[in-house]
């Protein structure tokens, strides 16, 4: 079983690592690089994106014919991890959520005309995007079947009414993927649409305050009161909304894990550097058995996470849906990130709790990992169903 990366992918991985070290890590030490929501300031982002494009590192997940690099999922896993060694990395290379997942699903399912209209501007970095799915209770959260927002056909248009919330990136998005209820059919009752920010009939009610750093555009609550969407802007067939979400969320859940591993590695490197030079009672902290136990366990857990991600990525590249493997990676890596940064803060002492390092930023960001794109409890239920159906075959090879 060979885990060696293809030479071309490994070459790109090293180039991403070098770009992050040279251009992005120095920015994190300057408070002026951050916006009011603790992400990279937009004017700074524009400059870094121009450098990423000039370096030939832009949008690796997209086809070369559309301006990307055409990476498979294994290639994405290797390089996304390197990107998110920096807090700013994914968005600089156009690999941040939610644009990353939206580009991937549109590239897979949209018509050529729809790709030209909705996808290409996102790839080019000229437009940002959001997916509009989750709703306030009693509407859809982890269960799309609870969808309350409706799309009612009126001639060659669909009229949208309802409320959505925790819509990541909505504050800056120009292009939106909307999931709405078109019938009471439990499997075919949802349909997916595209709409533009400038269309009337909807509004942002509020930007929801959260505990951690935010993606650009925040997490917003939206209200729809008669938004009209032409049928030409429907994605796939009427009733295929659940299928659209499944296509999007599969790879998107895994790309979250890829990025989180980069943050986990960064956290542990900060800890390792500190304990290697800090002394207490005449002994370097790194020489203490208790510290070595924490370091060794965290390093092992990160590598377990990497293996789970790579296995799921390889399955996706083989044409498998990899639902079991993705759920396993999602649960494990969400925990790995939280444990790694918690360990790093503990090893840094009061310094780790301060803003003198990025650890407190990563710690607050990490808490969402067990919630986004399916809570850990939901994924464990999925794994339980697989196990009960497969029993000993749950652990099959290949």
Image (cartoon, helix red, strand yellow):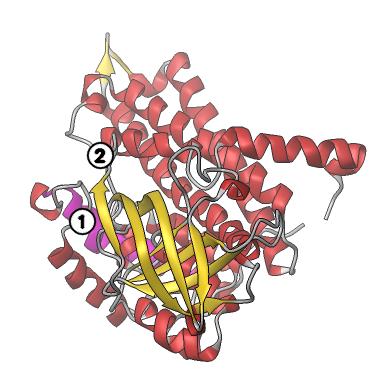
Secondary structure under tag 2 reads loop
Instruction: Describe residue 1's horizontal placement relative to residue 206 as left or right.
Output: right
**176 over 308 or under it: above or below:** below
Query: Which part of the image, by quadrant, shows the N terminus?
Result: bottom right
Q: Is residue 31 left or right of residue 80?
A: left
Q: Residue 146 placed where, x, y %?
A: 58, 46
Closer to the camera: disc 2 or disc 1?
2
Q: Quadrant of residue 171?
A: bottom left
Picture residue at 24% right of the left edge, 48% below the top: 206
Label 2, on which residue?
Answer: 209
Q: Place residue 328 in its image quadrant.
A: top right
Residue found at the far front of this picture: 154
Residue at the (22%, 69%) spot, across then down: 48
Left or right placement of residue 205 versus residue 356 in this view:
right
Q: In the displayed structure, does residue 136 sit left or right of residue 390?
A: left
Whether residue 257 is visible: yes
Label 2: few (<14), some (14–19) or many (≥20) C-alpha neighbours in 10 Å? few
Q: Residue at x 46, y 64 (%)?
A: 178
Identified at 59% across, 72% down, the residue is 72
Camera-side residue of 347 and 289? 347
Q: Which mark is residue 40?
A: 1
Of residue 42 and residue 57, the one placed in the foreground of this image is 42
Q: Main secondary structure of the magenta part?
A: helix
Disc on the earlier residue, 2 or 1: 1
When the figure is inspected, residue 280 is found, relative to residue 275, above or below; the finding is above
Q: Is residue 142 magenta?
A: no
Location of the C terminus by quadrant is bottom right
User: In the orientation shown, which residue stands out farthest toward the top?
Assistant: 281
Residue range corresponding to the magenta coloring: 11-30
Q: Residue 366: name its quadrant.
A: top left
Instruction: Give x and y (percent) for residue 357.
Output: 22, 36
Nearer to the camera, 208 or 72: 208
């Amino acid at each position: 079983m060979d885990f060696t990366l293809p030479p071309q992918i490994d070459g790109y991985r090293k180039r991403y690592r070098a770009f992050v070290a040279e251009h992005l890590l120095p920015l994190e030490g300057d408070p002026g690089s951050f916006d009011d929501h603790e992400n990279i300031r937009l004017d700074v982002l524009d400059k870094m994106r121009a450098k990423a494009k000039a370096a030939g590192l832009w949008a690796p997940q997209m086809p070369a014919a559309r301006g990307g690099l055409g990476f498979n999922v294994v290639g994405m896993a290797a390089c996304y991890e390197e990107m998110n060694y920096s807090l700013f990395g994914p968005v600089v290379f156009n690999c941040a959520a939610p644009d990353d997942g939206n580009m991937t699903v549109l590239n897979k399912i949209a018509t050529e005309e729809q790709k030209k209209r909705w996808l290409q501007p996102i790839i080019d970095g000229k437009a940002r995007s959001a997916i509009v799915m989750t709703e306030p209770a009693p509407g859809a959260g982890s269960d799309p079947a609870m969808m309350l927002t409706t799309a009612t056909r009126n001639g060659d248009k669909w009229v949208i009414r309802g409320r959505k919330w925790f819509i990541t990136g909505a504050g800056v998005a120009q292009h939106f993927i909307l999931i709405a209820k078109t019938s009471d059919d439990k499997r075919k009752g949802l349909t997916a649409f595209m709409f533009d920010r400038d269309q009337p009939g909807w509004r942002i009610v509020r930007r929801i305050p959260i505990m951690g750093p935010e993606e650009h555009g925040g997490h917003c609550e939206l209200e729809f009161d008669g938004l009209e969407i032409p049928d030409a802007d429907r994605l796939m067939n009427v009733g295929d909304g659940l299928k659209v979400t499944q296509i999007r969320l599969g790879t998107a859940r895994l790309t979250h894990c890829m990025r989180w591993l980069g943050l986990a590695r960064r956290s542990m490197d900060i800890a390792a550097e500190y304990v290697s030079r800090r002394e207490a009672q005449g002994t370097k902290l790194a020489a203490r058995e208790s510290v070595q136990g924490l370091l060794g366990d965290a390093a092992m857990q990160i590598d377990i996470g990497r293996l789970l991600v790579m296995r799921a990525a390889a399955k996706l590249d083989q044409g498998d849906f990899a639902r079991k493997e993705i759920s396993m990676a999602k649960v494990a890596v969400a925990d790995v990130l939280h444990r790694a940064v918690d360990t790093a803060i503990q090893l840094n002492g009061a310094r780790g709790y301060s803003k003198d390092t990025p650890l407190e930023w990563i710690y607050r960001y990490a808490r969402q990992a067990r919630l986004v794109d399916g809570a850990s409890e939901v994924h464990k239920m999925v794994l339980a169903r697989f196990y009960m159906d497969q029993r000993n075959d749950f652990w099959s090879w290949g």
